[in-house]
Image (cartoon, rainbow, N blue to C red):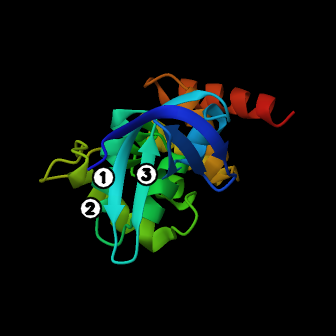
Amino acid sequence: MIGSVRGSVLERSPTGEVLVEVGGVGYRVLVPMSAVPSLSPGAGAFLFTHLHVRDDALVLYGFPTREERDTFEVLVGATGVGPKLALGILSVHSPAALRRALIDDDVDALTLVPGVGKRTAQRLLIELKARLDVPDFEPVEAAAPPTARAEVRGALAGLGYEPDEIRDVLAQLEADGPVEDLLRDALKLLAVSRV
């Protein structure tokens, strides 16, 4: 199994494939789209890798961090998630952002991934929470009240903001606080981003 590659980037494509030369051998590696800008031709590269074996091909996937590779491997193990979808998820969400979406039950964040609809996103929320060891904040006997961030998300959606705008602004807010303060700060940030 190839666990990592270190070498020079010979070329990269807009589809997320890079050619990394290691000791005179060029390895074609598929990477998350978020990693492509940092892998410019002529630059050195180090990628943690996952070798996916299919009947008709051996495909090498590469990631700038071990956490991304580990998350990819967990995603591939989920029902109905192949390497292409797992890579798509990591192209849209970092492991930390994915965890945050799972904690917040943010179906809209998962639907930002190409090919993921509402039904698939809801199924992924349930399965990935268990696989990624995301704490479940609902006690068995009763549902916990919604978090301040969940209330802010609902309020912004009610005001007509798009899911990607809401996700981006929530990422910039304090971790927690009174709903009124978080909503006021979110609206200020959204007003600035729309100017």
The residue that disc 1 covers is: 73
Q: Residue at x 50, y 32 (%)?
A: 7
Q: Residue at x 45, y 52 (%)?
A: 106
Q: CA distance from mark 1 to mark 2?
A: 6 Å
Give how far across and how far down residue 52 sits, in percent. 34, 61
Give how far across and how far down residue 130 sits, in percent. 21, 53
Quarter of the figure with residue 41: top right
Label 3 Cα crowd, 10 Å radius (few <14 / some 14-19 / many 20+): many
Q: CA distance from mark 1 to mark 3?
A: 10 Å
Residues tagged 1 and 3 counted as in contact (Cβ below 8 A) = no
Give how far across and how far down residue 150 sits, in percent. 45, 43
Task: Please tell me whether residue 133 is drawn above or below residue 108 in the rendered image.
Answer: above
Looking at the picture, tell me which residue is in the foreground, 161 or 33. Answer: 33
Q: Amino acid at mark 2?
A: Gly
Q: Secondary structure under badge 2?
A: loop
Q: Amino acid at mark 1?
A: Glu
Label 2 Cα crowd, 10 Å radius (few <14 / some 14-19 / many 20+): some
Can residue 175 be seen in the rendering of this structure? Answer: yes
The residue that disc 2 covers is: 77
The furthest residue to the bottom? 55
Residues tagged 2 and 3 counted as in contact (Cβ below 8 A) = no
Comparing marks 1 and 3, which lies closer to the viewer? Answer: 3
Q: CA distance from mark 2 to mark 3?
A: 15 Å
Q: Is residue 170 left or right of residue 96?
A: right
Q: Amino acid at mark 3?
A: Tyr
Label 1 Cα crowd, 10 Å radius (few <14 / some 14-19 / many 20+): some
Residues tagged 1 and 2 counted as in contact (Cβ below 8 A) = yes
Q: Earlier in the sequence, mark 1 or mark 3?
A: 3
Comparing marks 2 and 3, which lies closer to the viewer? Answer: 3
Q: Secondary structure under badge 3?
A: strand
The residue that disc 3 covers is: 61
